[in-house]
Amino acid sequence: MKHIVVGIFAHPDDEAFGPGGTFALYAKQGTPTYIITATDGVLGGDGVDITEVRHKEAKEAAKILGVSGQYMLGFSDGSISNNRYQDVLSKIVAQLQEILKDDKYTATFITFDRTGITGHLDHIAISMITTYLYQHLKEYLPNIKEAELHYYCLSTEQRPKSDKDYFVYCPCGCPKDQIDITKDVSKVLDIKKQAILAHASQNPDAILQSGDKNLSTEHFIIYSEEF
């Protein structure tokens, strides 16, 4: 059976600003990797062309990371937490059915942890939707025979020191004893940085300022319910 990795995120920069190194590592190993992005990112800047700009940036970042396929579902930025869960789920399932129609697979799904990393409601919603999909994989994607769901998280040490002028609530990070997987992505750090910089409209320097030590380490929680 083929093994694939599927990242399911809310916004066009989430894959790079988050676990970009993990996707780059999988790609270098020859594992097919796919990114599904739920929203158009329209709230990420001013101007009539911001959606087009963000789509181009996402495509470039995916190319840099070596992703096999990058798919934009087109929901309005900020809307997926507003009772549209089934609509988003249906589009994700349809996209995956198209990708995975010709074989049997094992899969690793990657999304945000339940806090959404930053407390962003779209992030939290996409985590919930991906979890629901995982719980019902045998119904929606029966050709996936084995799977794991990995929640990308920040450790308490990686959490930004201040959330002033950000969201009303920013989670405190994940304690070490709750983290199941820690990946050293230093070998692909340059690739990860290039992918971050590809999202030029989204102030990538703010992410890079967290430093190489933080950027070289990516943490995950394994969803514990059996597939």
Image: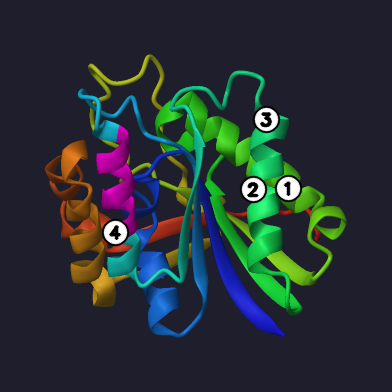
Where does residue 154 sit, x and y in percent of width and height?
A: 40, 46
Numbered range of the magenta stretch: 51-59
Quadrant including the N terminus: bottom right
Indicate which disc residue 133 carries.
1
Quadrant including the C terminus: bottom right
Where does residue 75 sit, x and y in percent of width and height?
A: 51, 32
Of label 1 and label 2, which has the lower sequence position?
Answer: 2
Of label 3 and label 2, which has the lower sequence position?
Answer: 3
Tag 1 and tag 2, C-beta contact below 8 Å:
yes
Q: Few, some or many C-alpha atoms within 10 Å of disc 3 (few <14, some 14-19, many ≥20)?
A: some
- Of 122 and 102, nearer the camera is 102
* Amino acid residing under circle 2: Ile
In this rendering, the label closer to the viewer, 1 or 2: 2
* Amino acid residing under circle 3: Tyr
- Of 64 and 46, nearer the camera is 46
Q: Which residue is mark 3?
A: 85
Where does residue 219 sit, x and y in percent of width and height?
A: 44, 57
Disc 1, SS = helix
Of label 4 and label 2, which has the lower sequence position?
Answer: 4
* Amino acid residing under circle 1: Leu
Q: Which residue is mark 2?
A: 92
Can residue 151 be seen here? The reply is no
Q: Which residue is mark 4?
A: 61
